[in-house]
Amino acid sequence: MAFPRLVRRRRAFPQPRTRSPEDPRTPGPEDHKTRGPRKEAVTHAVPPLAELRALKREGLARDPGRTRALLGELVDPLDLEAAGALLSAPTAHEQLSGVPGLTGGRVALLGSSTLHQLPHLLTAAMVRDGILPDVRSAGFDQWQWEIMSGAPELKDHRPDLTALLLDDHALYGRIADPLDIDAVEAACAAFPGTLREWTAACHELLGGLTVLCTVPLSPLSRDRIVDYRTKARLDAAWYRMNAEILDIGGALPATVVLSYTGIAAHAGGTVFGSHRMRHIAGQVYAPEFLRAYADELSRVARAQLGGAKKCLVLDLDDTLWGGILGDDGLAALRIGGAYPGSAHQELQELARDLAAQGVVLAIASKNDDDTVREAVATHPDMVLSPSSFAAVRANWAPKPGNVRELATELNLGRDALVFVDDSPVERGLMRRALPEVTTVELPPDAAGFAAHVAARGDFGVLALTGEDRDRARLYQAGARRAEARDNAADLEEYLQDLGSRLTVEAAGPLNTERISQLFGKTNQFNLTGRRFTVDDIARPAAGAGFYAARLTDRFGDNGLIAALALSAEPRGGWRIDNLVLSCRVFSRGVEDCLVALLLRAARRRGAPAVLAAFHPTPKNHRFADFYLRHGFIEAASGQVASGQDVRQDTGQDVRQDFRHDLDDIADPPRWIGVAEPEGAFHAH
């Protein structure tokens, strides 16, 4: 007798009493938050992994957003491993290659134990985060031999990111007697130096970013010692060793060091796997730890490729504060003090700290605008103030429309926004209407809001720059510029009144991080999509040079807002390898000024021509005719040169080539003053 198939169901939301004219599926004004029980939408729940398999049969490229969403629903390491294996298959990789929103990336993995699960876990994590990886692993415990022998397995892979995950065998394998605490202390003291040498050699051979991790001490290694004094010496030596390993990240270029304790915290405290698997397969780490490690590697890769999110869009009622402003009134809002007010205050404190590190804050709330502004400005327990927020949308319109307007006002792509709202209804609407916005699935209890948002790592960057820390002031100055623009009679009057001044500077120790960040994070005005690491800029190849431009005006310093990579052609010409411009200064003529200065400098130094190329991506299409508008002529289309590190979401390698013979060069915009009239450009 066959058993009937069971279909899990989720409980339904009550239907809204009225509908918004903009979206008939969207709750109207009277459907604001109440304290009633939360309910979830009805779905015929198909397990995410089963749906992913079905999508693969239909063709993953048909709905890549759904593929990424399904990967986000998977939690169990075995399910994620299976999903990663499915996506690593040649047919799946071919289906996803060239899909908009997925950037290619090459990864190399090395370790001292069996890591056969890690490539699949990493593939699942990276596709979920918008990266289509090509992962290659070295052999079992071959981490030293692979690099010292010239990287025979990995060198032709040319990885963008090389990750090394060691266990304590990497150190105890060097010690004859594990009970000889003097020998163990000496080995711990020497091991960071070994890793420094290994990292330098790895970077020299493979390039890209190297990711290390501190080394956990296994219980067996510690517990074999019976006296507590010796155990304390072992622990102290181990802590000192890991502290020195963490210091490698600041001492060597293009190097990131992860802490195994932080990864273990995201894995529920789990580090080591079963003893049986250690004996049978040499598998030291638990699947839960490897899953959390893969998540962290994916965040690092996303940061390397400029995929960090930029703006946190926050709901208010029962999110940033406890209670419903419209129902309870200002005095009854719960912020700080006893729970749940303490939980909402904790989320505000997290938002404040994120803003101090360059994250833009915005409000999207179903409330009256004047009531919201009064509450934010006057509630005595508010951690955040009106100046904390770059933009506010408080009204009764559907939130997806408000978030669209926020993105436009802030001049940010919608994929740079992270939306946080306690209402599952609003989260569901946002996912459906704006899937490109990252919508955070909050836990049901406000006590976990802050920890959950922080643990996601949406805003992680490789290194924080001065412009990052000053971003709140930059956006506030931007709001004053917008007000001046609205009050001006015409655009030229506004631009003249700004008093803009441009300074071009060559790459150096004080600006290298920011230049690399501009190449990595800029997506709209990015003419080739080519990324450059800190090490690329600090140690340029022969004939290459990197430059940045700073813009100031009467409202203040905009910071470094443009970056340019130049190289010398064999016959004396100059080539623009990439030009990027921050969206903060669009429509102000900065790009026109930069190109005019560059062309003048090339002519003055006797260059016969300046060459350039445009590589189309899903986000830079509005600038496809940029070079034509600046006097370049189109040359025959070419192919991306072998070995050229070009990131394109289109998967196409065809480019448009351009040439300027330096005969007729337009003048820079008259409303921009230039610190050095000819600029600092030169071909090396």
Image: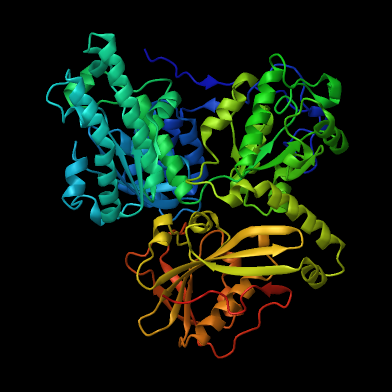
**Color theme of the render:** rainbow
Q: Is residue 74 above or below residue 156?
A: above
Q: Quick one: which residue is furthest to the bottom in this view?
A: 663
Q: Is residue 644 above or below residue 292?
A: below
Q: Residue at 85%, 26% (x, y): give it.
A: 326
Query: Where does the image place residue 370, in percent across and percent down from the top left?
Result: 87, 37
Query: Where does the image place residue 121, in percent across and percent down from the top left?
Result: 36, 35
Q: Nearer the viewer, residue 14 or 233?
A: 233
Q: Quick one: which residue is furthest to the left in this view?
A: 176
Q: Is residue 194 above or below residue 606?
A: above
Image quarter of residue 38: top right
- Can residue 80 be seen here? The reply is no
Location of the N terminus (image quadrant): top left
Q: Nearer the viewer, residue 275 or 148?
A: 148
* Label total for image: 0
Query: Where does the image place residue 156, in percent across and percent down from the top left?
Result: 24, 56
**Position of residue 332 in the picture relative to residue 224 (left or right):** right
- Can residue 402 be seen here? The reply is yes
**Position of residue 129 in the picture relative to residue 418 (left or right):** left
Q: Residue at 19%, 46% (x, y): give it.
A: 146
**Position of residue 433 in the picture relative to residue 599 (left or right):** right
Image quarter of residue 33: top right
Query: Where does the image place residue 502, in percent across and percent down from the top left?
Result: 65, 69
Q: Residue at 34%, 31% (x, y): give it.
A: 242
Location of the C terminus (image quadrant): bottom left
Q: Nearer the viewer, residue 79 or 41?
A: 79
